[in-house]
Amino acid sequence: MKYYIKELSRMADTYISAYPNAGFPNELGEYDDSPSFMADEIYSLAHKGHLNIVGGCCGTTPEHIKTIKKKL
């Protein structure tokens, strides 16, 4: 997803948003990416100016959102 976000931000003259999952679902249908890992990944894109709006989709918990907010 990072590659496409970087390309979009390079070409677009508008805000870029991302609502990533907390990883891929495992064999039990659960999402394994930790809040800190997800926050670090989003931070790296936002810090470089590739993202303006962020959120979370499948597997994202209130702790994920809290950690992302604190990191940004």
Image (cartoon, rainbow, N blue to C red):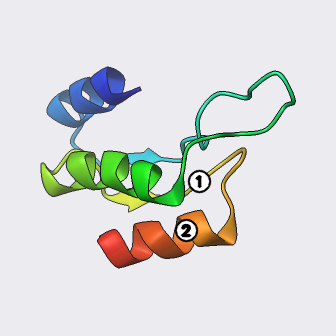
- Judge whether 45 appears above or below 54 on screen: above
Residue nearest the observer in this picture, 30 or 68: 30
- Judge whether 72 appears above or below 14 on screen: below
Q: How many marks?
A: 2
> x%, y% of residue 22?
60, 43
Q: Residue placed farthest to the right in the image?
A: 28
The reply to whether dot 2 and dot 1 touch (C-beta < 8 Å) is yes
> x%, y% of residue 72?
30, 70
Task: Indicate the amino acid at tag 1.
Answer: Gly
Q: Tell me: 20 left or right of 28.
A: left
Residue 46 visible, this orientation: yes
Q: Tell me: 68 left or right of 48.
A: right
Residue nearest the observer in this picture, 17 or 3: 3
Residue at 32 percent across and 32 percent down: it is 5
**CA distance for labels 2 and 1:** 7 Å
Location of the N terminus by quadrant is top left
Residue nearest the observer in this picture, 8 or 19: 19
Residue 15 visible, this orientation: no
Q: Residues within 10 Å of mark 2 (few under 14, many from 20)?
A: some
Q: Residues within 10 Å of mark 1 (few under 14, many from 20)?
A: some
Name the mark on residue 56. 1
* Mark 2 or mark 1: whose residue is earlier in sequence: 1
Q: Tell me: 23 left or right of 42.
A: right
The residue identified by callout 2 is: 65
- Label 1: element kind: loop
Task: Indicate the amino acid at tag 2.
Answer: Ile
Residue at 33 percent across and 29 percent down: it is 2
> x%, y% of residue 67?
46, 70
